[in-house]
Image (cartoon, rainbow, N blue to C red):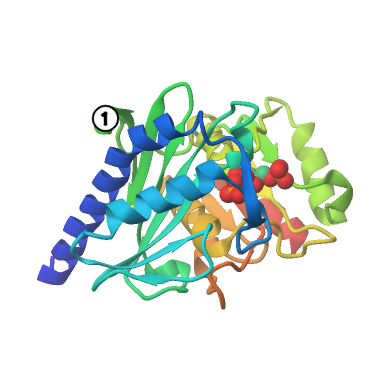
Amino acid sequence: MTDESSREDDVVDAVVETLCAAAPSIRAGLPGRRVYEEGTNPSGERQLEADTYADELLLKRLRPLDGVGEYASEERADVIDIGEGVSVALDPLDGSTNLKPNNVMGTLYSVYDEPLPTGGENLLAAGYILYGPVTTLVAARDGVVSEYILESGIKRPLREELTLPDDPAIFSFGGRVNHWFDEFEAFASETERTEGMKLRYGGSMIGDVNQILHYGGVFAYPAQTDAPSGKLRQQFEGFPIGYIIECAGGRSSDGEQSLLSGTPDGIHDRVPVYIGNDSLVESLEARLG
Ligand code: FBP
């Protein structure tokens, strides 16, 4: 291991520890921030006070870290220069529309060894902190995915080196069915009728993907007839979730290739997202192809 890569490892550790340490403050700050603010985020979506609160808190906590050069977030237009080193991209509160109906959401992170925007192949690490009945961390790095319980921001190992179960049991499809392309609708209809498969869709990508990590299956926020690039952001959502699933032995796709093979022009570019067990995503790609 070179000095530079061990230094990068230390920086990635510090980023993950900092996000974990901030989790109790984010969770505690949610109850009083369930109202929408004026204006929208760079993707044209309304922002809850909780979205901007989490974004500002995480930037404040990450800014002093040595070895972090850039900060970017789904909630702000531009990349911020905060020093020398790796680049951190955050979806501060993925699934924040779940705050009002009190369903799961969380913080999704990705760390790159190149300035942003950059391609999925420049990922060093990715993961998410899930605010569910308990707070958990799923962290992926160097081909390994591990899950932890977070108690007062401290990690306690739950499952090390986790991989997708061989027998898929879950399907989770987003978007509006009447805007699905025929090829995807055919795949969805066949999957829904497959023995042993059942529906789980909660409106938070990381909540739904965590189901796939535990039970196997397929998640998709597909291309739509009115939105051919889908809804999810390539840099903040597509890359980290593709990386986590591929590290867990699954497969990711944008409909044609691994999500990680993509390179965005802008940090708020969108991408269709298909992830899950290899066999399911392979047959989906064949249909879409
Ligand atoms: P946010 O990051 O703004 O929450 O948007 C992403 C997301 O909430 C995903 O977590 C989820 O999969 C999807 O959008 C839900 O979209 P829809 O409300 O169309 O089902």
- On the image, which quarter does residue 270 sit in? bottom right
Spot the residue most to the top: 133
Residue at 49% in and 36% down: 213
Question: Looking at this view, is 91 or 199 the one in front?
Answer: 91
Mark 1 beta carbon near ligand 1 (under 8 Å)? no
Question: Residue 123: x percent and y percent?
Answer: 38, 64
Residue where numbered disc 1 is placed: 157
Left or right of residue 61, residue 26 in this image: right
Q: Is residue 31 shown to the viewer in this render?
A: yes
Asked whether 96 or 2 is in front, the reply is 96
Q: SS of the residue at dot 1? A: strand
Q: What quarter of the picture does the N terminus occupy?
A: bottom left
Query: Which one is nearer the viewer's eye here, 70 or 289?
Result: 70
State which quadrant residue 82 falls in: bottom left
Is residue 134 toward the left or the right of residue 85 in the image? right
Q: In what quadrant of the picture does the C terminus appear?
A: bottom right
Q: Residue at x 63, y 43 (%)?
A: 36
Mark 1 crowd level (few <14, some 14–19, many ≥20, 10 Å Cα): few
Name of the residue lying farthest toward the front: 38
Task: Tell me: 237 left or right of 127.
Answer: right
- Residue 65: horizontal and vertical position, in percent? 21, 59
Measured as percent of width and height from the top left, residue 249 is found at: 44, 47
User: Which kind of residue does numbered mark 1 sit on?
Assistant: Pro
Q: Total of numbered circles in the picture?
A: 1
Q: Residue at 78% of width from left, 62% of height from top?
A: 227
Residue 249 seen in the current view: no
Using the rendered view, name the quadrant where residue 86 is placed: bottom left
Determine the residue located farthest toward the left in the rendered image. 3
